Amino acid sequence: MRALISVSDKTGVVEFAKELEALGWEILSTSGTMKMLKEAGVKVTSVSDVTGFPEICDGRVKTLHPKIHGALLARRDIEDHMAQLAANGIEKIDLVCVNLYPFRETIAKPDVTMEDAVEHIDIGGPSMLRSAAKNWPSVTVAVNPEDYATIIAEIKETGDTTPETRLQLSAKAYTHTAEYDMAIATYMRAQAGLNEKLFLEYDLKQGLRYGENPHQNAKFFASMEKVPFSLATAEQLNGKELSYNNIQDANAALNIVREFSGVPFCVGLKHMNPCGAAIGKDVVEAWTKAYEADKVSIFGGIVATNCEVNAEVAALMKPIFLEIIMAPSFTQEALDILCTKKNLRLLKVDMSEDTKPHAQYVSMNGGMLVQEQDTTIKLPTADMCVTETKPTDAQLIDLDFAWKIVKHVKSNAIVVVKDGMTYGVGAGQMNRVGSANIAMKQAEATLAEKGIDVKEFGLVMGSDAFFPFGDSVESAAQYGVKAIVQPGGSVRDQESIDAANANGITMLFTGERHFKH
């Protein structure tokens, strides 16, 4: 039995080769892999000795030879194929262990040249993989070091891998070469100035019980790219399996949490809109304020915080019916409290800082929309003020808070806040006045429970897009709003400015819109 080993990722390859050698296999190899194996004491035959032809063109040509590909492609069950091998002095190769030049890693370098990128396009490797994978009934092909142990175990048990394993390994090899070719095609098309082709690489993470509704099938696929604030890499510590709607809602909550760093923050979310959000001196205060912002809507909702969940806050959360709690970590005491609720999903999520823009995909009938995620946001500052009344320092802090929250509310979006806490959220209405009225009515009801007159409270308002008329400002004034942040940019901005001036409201124009459809 003969194995050809030639890898770029050398993880575990020495141990793999030694195991094969101990089982009586002859090892063939090339260049760097051969040198490494020999230094480790493995007896290795050079591919050049097999082909009778040296490596040429700086190593570009070494395995592209009939004595390699004939040895891989010949069907063992066809006598004529075996006769042709014998007539041409070709010995069978029974196993190929190959992974490819690091093309993707090369083009990720900021200073990469096209010449360097092209030199990292593997030719012989994919050819060998495809030949071995095509002849999977007889040839084992390994592209991933994680499969070495299975291969060795089966050879030790039966003298060869099983047909089932060889078929699986064949499929993995074709996947490996397909992903490799997608990366090359994307890069070369960009260099050549051709129209883009969208290639997506996602692995099935789990099948879901159903989609948005019970009659819809659904699956959850994870990106090849590992990113923070992602459910694809979250660790589930308790609770039943996530549903399609759980994943959508949880993702929306994590996007809100990402806006806040350096200050304890907590958000409650329902149907992809925040129903309560707050900052606090610690996780207990942040949760308490977020919960009190809307005790009704949080029922059956999702909670996310950027703080470790400790026993004190866990005890406060436990009596509330929640679907999911997400945090960067949980103390053991908190887990002891919360895990008594067997269906409550607890997710430990990587919340490390990430400023890199990532693509966002939305499927259409017969098409796909792609955009960068909306991860940037301007800090509202005093010099953005367009009204006679100027913002106080406390109002600027709340304007920043409102601006970060309203960004994640479905358009048309209005939020009203004070002291780092939401009091009203108006989402997804067909006109902005409707959203404002919803937010205001909610704030009025929440404050009335505490015996506070909304008109005397001094709320701060955030709007995700400009006011097309002055009516939203007039409505806000009726509820005692004292400061507003919005993008500006309407041809009738002056109407809003005049309305704000008439009511003693300070208003900031950020020049930045945050629609969320």
Image (cartoon, rainbow, N blue to C red):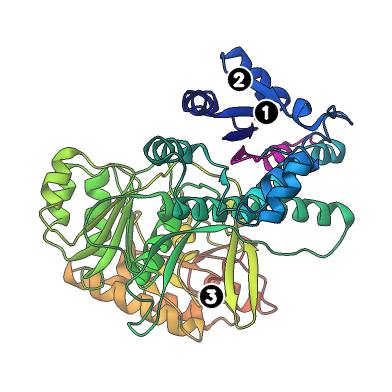
Residue drawn 88% across and 58% down? 193
Q: What kind of residue is marked 2?
A: Leu
Badge 1 element: strand
For marks 1 and 3 on the same chain, the one whose residue lies earlier in the sequence: 1
**Residue 103 painted magenta:** yes
Compared with 23, 66 (above or below) is: below
- Viewer-proximal residue, 416 or 210? 210
Callout 1: 10 Å neighbours few (<14), some, many (20+)?
A: many
- What residue is pinned by disc 1? 29
Q: What kind of residue is marked 3?
A: His
Question: Could you say where residue 125 lies in the image, as x and y percent from the top left?
Answer: 71, 41
Question: Could you say where residue 308 lies in the image, as x and y percent from the top left?
Answer: 28, 41
Residue drawn 53% across and 61% down? 389
Relative side of 229 to 225, left or right: left
Q: CA distance from mark 2 to mark 1?
A: 9 Å
Compared with 17, 298 (above or below) is: below
Residue range corresponding to the magenta coloring:
92-112
Q: Quadrant of the N terminus?
A: top right
